[in-house]
Image (cartoon, grey):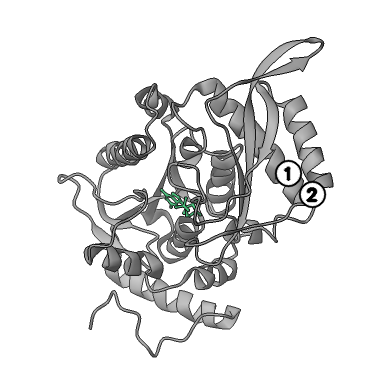
Amino acid sequence: MDCNKRPESMERITTKELANAFIDEQVELVRKQVGDKKVLLALSGGVDSSVVAALLIKAIGKQLVCVHVNHGLMRKGESQGVIDMFQGELDANLIYVDATDRFLDLLAGVSEPEKKRKIIGKEFIEVFADEARKLEGVSFLAQGTIYPDILESIKAAEGKKAVKSHHNVGGLPEDLKFELVEPIKLLFKDEVRVVGEALGLPHAMVYRQPFPGPGLGVRCLGAITRDRLHALREADAILREEFDNNGLAGKVWQYFIAVPDIKSVGVKDESRYEGWPAIIRAVNTTDAMTATIEEIPYEILHKITYRITHEVEGINRVLLDLTPKPIGTIEWE
Ligand code: XMP
């Protein structure tokens, strides 16, 4: 039997009962597979890696070693949230690596989007491999692979061209040979969320909007600088707060700020004030292959504009991106 093929008889996990049955089955399978060995997991804080972490903590407790790499391109408060949840609440064995300088130094002056993506993806693997080499007795690598990833790689193997190089932990160096543990690889995203909630993860974590592997790196457009990255992170936090406060968070699939590398002239305290524009992107989609624009009430847009231009140093305009996918991709880079 091809273990990467979802059996036709497999029932769609839509309820807590079905999720619990799946969890019990996977807990048994994982214990059988890994015995008393250690398992390593790159925990980004995204839905898939978080659900795998919670599942493996249930199955093997401290035999799971989670590594959270902060590439310096996380959203505001995000790494702290991962630490609070997994180290604080779930008592996980978690290694936190602040690799901000490694990433930002490598990215300095690089403006070409695919080059940026490649640098971030490659460096991520290197930082993770460096941590893995420091550990002893680890034989397994857990991954948050889900069924669409498998379908996607089949498509790639058939020679269909990808629009962007997506980043995932894969392709570790030769000296690091691990056996894979992929407990959710036959699940679709909606099922992963049901399983996550059954494992006790908070609703907000399980239903959080997707965040690209290269993080804010593909939203700080062109060559990344620390000051513009900081402005982007602050503006994005305001956008998310206002979407939360105004009931939009559950309605819009993905929303974020992008900040291009251009400045315009503004005026502040009766003086010339040059700043970057913050671009709001808010889209709805079912599969991320196409996307439509969500209409945001003007009243809320005015409030967001006021707050961003008054609270974020360096931003003097707010723009709204009305482009569907296609023709625009969801991310700008
Ligand atoms: P695009 O920009 O291609 O994005 O329309 C489609 C969806 O994928 C997300 N995205 C990524 N997700 N690694 C990921 O895991 C990546 O490198 C990556 N790049 C884009 C994007 O946020 C959107 O939800």
What SS does tag 2 mark? helix
Task: Specify the amino acid type for callout 2.
Answer: Asn
Mark 1 and mark 2: Cα distance apart in space: 6 Å
Image check: 112 left or right of 294? left
User: Looking at the picture, does residue 199 appear above or below residue 272?
Assistant: below
Image check: 310 left or right of 58? right
Residue 35 seen in the current view: no
Task: Specify the amino acid type for callout 1.
Answer: Glu
Quarter holding residue 16:
bottom right
The quarter in which the N terminus is drawn is bottom left
What SS does tag 1 mark? helix
Circle 1: is it few (<14), some (14-19), or many (20+) Cα within 10 Å? some
Q: Who is closer to the viewer here, 311 or 264? A: 264
Relative image position of residue 324 (x, y in whole percent): 57, 55
Image check: 233 left or right of 243? left
Q: Residue furthest top?
A: 271
Q: Give the numbered dot on residue 245.
A: 2
Q: Residue furthest right?
A: 299
The quarter in which the C terminus is drawn is top left
Q: Does mark 2 have its CB less than 8 Å from ligand 1?
A: no
Q: Which residue is mark 1?
A: 241
Circle 2: is it few (<14), some (14-19), or many (20+) Cα within 10 Å? few
User: Looking at the picture, does residue 283 appear above or below residue 172?
Assistant: below
The reply to whether discs 1 and 2 touch (Cβ–Cβ < 8 Å) is yes
Q: Name the residue located 46 percent from the left edge and 72 percent from the top edge.
A: 188
Q: Residue furthest left?
A: 174
Q: Give the numbered dot on residue 177.
A: none
Q: Name the residue located 49 percent from the left edge and 57 percent from the top edge.
A: 326
Q: Does mark 1 have its CB less than 8 Å from ligand 1?
A: no
Relative image position of residue 283 (x, y in whole percent): 61, 55
